[in-house]
Image (cartoon, grey):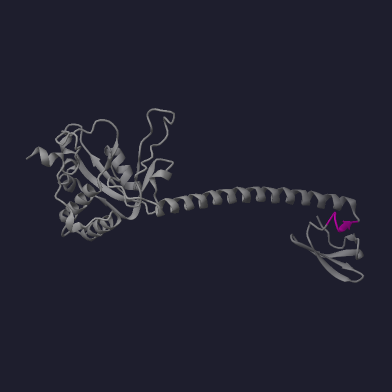
Amino acid sequence: MDLLNEQVTHRRFGKGNVVAYDDGYVEVRFPLGIKKFVFPDVFGTHLLLVNPKLAKQVDGVKLKIEKERQKEDAELEVMRAIEEARRQRVRERERLLKNHKLSPVSQAAFWCDDEEQERVFSEWRVFTSLKKSGVNKGEPNRLVRLHQNSCCLITAREPDVPEKDRRVVGLFMVGELFVGKLCEDGYIPAHSEYRLRLSEEESRKILFWNYYVNERYPRNMTWNSGRHRYFDNVWMAQILQDIVALKNGSEEVELAQSFLEHFCDMNRLKETDLPSPNGALVRDST
């Protein structure tokens, strides 16, 4: 479509000729001088082409552009809605963080098989599992006690060893902005810094039942059902303290110590006041 030198009429400036145009503007020479207009918006409203064939082509261009603009506006509206929903989640998260009341049992221990362990430590997140009954059956479980002060403990037990030999294979603080109540997909992300994986040799020295105990059955060492359970804040600090001692002299000792200090700060614990572990395995040996 070539508009150069085409005759046009304007309701105010009269007759003129197109002297220049591009995708954004058109310039027309009138008896009073050259005027510049937005292309193609001006055609069909303030500016009319004398050539009907070209006028029809310009109308087609206008229609195409209008559809593209409507599509862009619709996409922009969707983006605005998404952004507003994100801001709402941020506001809700900030409210929950501000009003959070520290629970003495706000940690979580998970039982992971070999395949899932690799996934957890490569993706640095753990899945809570799905609800098995009720109206919300099939939906991810929400560990509502988990907050910024929470840590996820990853444990493992080989099928041919007794439950008392369950090992701690790694642990991580939850993501900096994680709030269990708001977790919809069931995945708990790891903190960007405070995360540790133990070697197999190290894990055999950090046994889960040295720390965990069911006070109703203090010598009972059975996991029963489910792949996770809440865990006492003090027990988690004891584990971290023992990991620091275990890693003394290694490259990870500074991270482990920093991890412990951060955990104690977040849970209002004093490292020097931590009692010795007194889990079911310890009690069973006395």
Quadrant of res 40: bottom right
Which residue in the rendered view is the most extreme toward the bottom?
Answer: 33
Residue shown at 91% from the left, 61% from the top: 11
Which residue in the rendered view is the most extreme toward the left?
Answer: 286
Residue shown at 42% from the left, 34% from the top: 139
The N terminus sits in image quarter: bottom right
* Observer able to see residue 91: yes
Residue toward you, 9 or 130: 130
The number of callouts visible is 0
Residue 260 point in image, percent of width and height: 24, 56
The C terminus sits in image quarter: top left
Left or right of 274 in this view: 190: right
Start and end of the magenta stretch? 43-49
Residue 138 point in image, percent of width and height: 42, 31
* Observer able to see residue 198: no
Residue toward you, 6 or 136: 136
Q: Residue 138 magenta-drawn?
A: no
Residue shown at 36% from the left, 36% from the top: 129
Quadrant of res 23: bottom right
Residue toward you, 128 or 213: 213
Relative to 40, say whether 218 is above or below. Answer: above
Relative to 50, say whether 284 is above or below. Answer: above
Residue 162 point in image, percent of width and height: 15, 33
Residue 106 point in image, percent of width and height: 30, 46
Left or right of 82 in this view: 269: left
Q: Residue 44 magenta-drawn?
A: yes
Relative to 237, say whether 13 is above or below. Answer: below
